[in-house]
Image (cartoon, grey):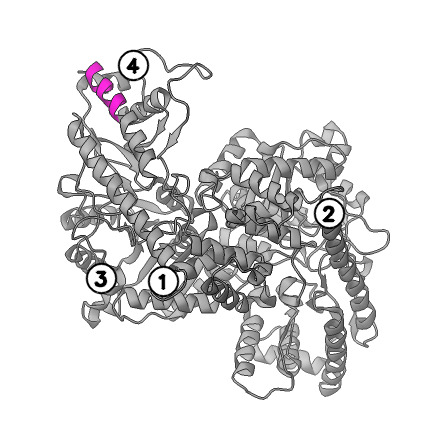
Amino acid sequence: MSFLKEIRPLGERRNYSELLDLSSGDPHRGGIKPITFVRQVLAACFCPALLEDDSLPLDVKQRAKSLLRECDGGSVGSYTESSGIAKIKHCVSQFITRRDGGVPSSPDNIFIMSGSKTALMIILKLLIRSEDSCRTGVLIPVPTYASITMILEEEGAAIIPYHLCEEQGWTLQLEELHRVLQAARKTCNPVAFYICNPGNPTGHLQSRESIEEVIRFAAEERLFLLADEVYQSCVYGDNAEFYSYKKVLSEMGSNISSTVELASFNSASKGFMGECGFRGGYVELVNLDPAVMKYARTLFSTRSCPPVAGQIALDLMADPPKPGDPSFPTFSEEVQSIKNTIRKNTGRIQEVFAELPGISCQPLKAGFFVFPSLHFPPKAIKWAEKRQMEPDMLYCLHLLEETGLHVKPGCEYGQRKDSHHIRLFVGTQENIMEDALQRLKTFHTRFMKEFS
Amino acid sequence: MNANVKKVDYAVRGPIVQRAVQIEKELKEGVKKPFEEVIKANIGDAHAMGQRPITFFRQVMALCTYPELLDDNKFPEDAKNRARRILQSCGGNSIGAYTTSQGIDCVRHDVANYIQRRDGGIPSDPDNIYLTTGASDGIVTILKLLTAGEGRTRTGVMISIPQYPLYSASIAELGAVQVSYYLNEEKCWSLDISELQRALQAAREHCNPRVLCIINPGNPTGQVQSRQCIEDVIRFAAKENLFLMADEVYQDNVYAEGCKFHSFKKVLFEMGPEYSSKVELASFHSTSKCYMGECGFRGGYMEVINMDADVKAQLTKLVSVRLCPPAPGQALMDLVVNSPQPGEPSYQTFMKERTAVLSALAEKAKLTEEILNTVPGISCNPVQGAMYSFPRITLPERAINEAKAKGQAPDMFYCMKLLEETGICLVPGSGFGQREGTYHFRMTILPPTDKLKIMLNKLKEFHQKFTQQYS
């Protein structure tokens, strides 16, 4: 079928039997199975009658019991402290300390929320003075996922985009940061700097030096750092290592480490947990003025409390089964299997893309997505212009129509002019990824041929 | 920092609760006090006070979470069927997948069916149903949607005095204008249209009143509005072009003789197309109250009626920003609106549990009113519904002065002393709003009956002592 015809009307027979949705970062939707230990503990917490059951392992029962003891009335149906159950915040703070090789973390600086985005919105509320004649500005990367832009617009912030450098693997360039900041100061009051590491959609993993650069930049320019680190446990590239902003900050000399204000976000939605629907997220606040912390607490308290199921998911993420625990063998097998799947998927993606003309990708190291560049022939650009649509949007629409594969176009994330991308989720079952790649390959080959 | 944030106040979890938490810690550490435990009668949390969850609900939740249990013959078939149905609607058949921002399809259908049944057949469109993270989330979202303008055209939001402080806090945070209308304490906290009119007139001088919030059954007052009153409010909203927000989270909590819950939607539609096709209404419900008490699941929904299509598109966009409400809360909401039916295996147990909870609450509502009214200086209106009493307390002049010298609201001063001396944690009336020169406190009726009796009697003792001490 020629692309020059209109999109086929709904209801017509298609040559695929089901849609493949690789558009959102949702592992379970992609066929990845939940972690057994997590689901067993949650089920026992929901229905404590299960604690009498022989079917559940001992460590599951013990964990469920210890969590229920922290709930008022022994029920997950009770409200909790607004910032989360104390013991769970403690558990999260210990997770952070372990992760950061001993850098202290206080439960008092941790706020659990219904998903990390809710936490981000509250921090932004604290920072953004929309009443001022001079708008509060927040620096955000391009590309970045659409929710961030929407949240900032909703809060009345001025958006200050800084471009990531695709040719160098989507790295941050200090000159670019300085350039946009200088320009922005003419029209708004920049107060915060947002970065997602590992990146969404780019999958970029910041080097330690890059993180230090950003921290120094924030210190010099007095910017509040918003470090979205929800993909911190999705690192699969060879020799790739995640550095947390908190750890790097702590090692940068007391002038900086005790003054730069930082909010870092994590979530039970990503990584091996993939429990997106449970809405478990947290923010750790570093170096905030105690007076401001007081207001932060009040703001958080008006949200009642985060869903208890999400809090439990965070506890299990922060303190999973250890060697020697009855559930450990199954747990570690399941986690390893997910890691292998993602490695295999990204490997296959790179293989398939290498064979295809007009599609290229920066090295894949981390995160949940790949963000390959599409090099459209001029005919394709003209075709899109005629239809008054972004070329990658039109590409994705046709991809969906023709093959049933749903991915997101780069225009939804922001990109340099005349560049085009698509975003694919990598956290699916291997056979689903293979199917997706075949569909993409078929479509892309035909597309490039037709517009050559 | 954002200046609006400084104005935000939420008494239910405010300083008195913080002190209560501190005292609990001290008790745990072995510090000696004139009491053994803190009784948290400040927050409408039924399970915290010992109310048991509904067995059926928790069974289905366990089945949804760990579907291997579908092979376990200890779970009844109707629970399994509900679980299968919910899971089929979830991505990857997992309750851990994101759902659509508006909420799981089959749940919204079930909610619409529930509303239709409840309202005697008046149709409800699933497309008008938004599942939310507790009712609070829906309320804040609608307020956000409707707040606009600057200076004299800034949106005014009418809310009762007394009110549940989520409203005042959200209005402050959004920079909207609070337009207070006083409920009539002498007439059992009823709503007078003339008072609504007065408040509206006055507000029009300095803002653009666009929204009218009603909590029915009331929080903190417990008042259950008569059908006539609801009709009058609807007529008023129609005449003055106000968006009605009907907070109906306590719709099953009705105890008093002669009182009945009338949903705003039902009354609206029974008033004929002159009203039902024009008045904009959002009504809110939740899994946190009624007989369920499942606060921690953060389940809720709102139904929007007669919303302009463009505005509704904005609403849909607004809710998409946070991705989706917690899936377990959505599943639980499904069970609330799709509970066991006669003939199903779980029906008997379900009804028994539900009835036990609601009748215990009715008993405690009566008990609270009776005992408090035996205390000189305390006057309690009948607790017609919801979960709280909001009695008026007479404070001696000296106490009022001492409080003011400390920079404390007199009823806060009273409640703090009560906490320190008896371990009973209540919320002072100043946190909810009250007529100038009057003082109240809000106390839940949730503790188990025996404990409630003890608590009420301790309160009686304290009040008498306090009155004497400061006379």
The residue indicated by pointer 3 is: A219
Of all chains, the one bearing label 3 is A
**B320 is higher (above) or lower (below) than A325:** above
First to last magenta residue range: A441-451
Specify whether residue A306 is in view: no
Please say if the residues under marks 4 and 3 sit with CB atoms less than 8 Å apart.
no
A449 inside magenta stretch: yes
Residue type at mark 2?
Tyr
Q: Nearer the viewer, residue A145 or A14?
A: A14
Circle 2 is placed at which residue position? Answer: B347
Residue A16 percent location from the top left of the image: 38, 21
Q: Is residue B224 magenta?
A: no
- The residue that label 4 is drawn on is A3
Q: Chain of mark 1?
A: A
Q: Amino acid at mark 1?
A: Glu
Q: Residues within 10 Å of mark 3 (few under 14, many from 20)?
A: some
Mark closest to the chain's N terminus, 4 or 3 = 4
Which-is-in-front pick, marks 2 and 4?
Answer: 2
Residue A74 image offset from top left, x and y in percent: 58, 66
Q: Tell me if mark 4 has few (under 14), some (14-19) or many (20+) residues whose alpha carbon lies within 10 angstroms of its own.
A: some
- Dots 1 and 2 on the same chain: no
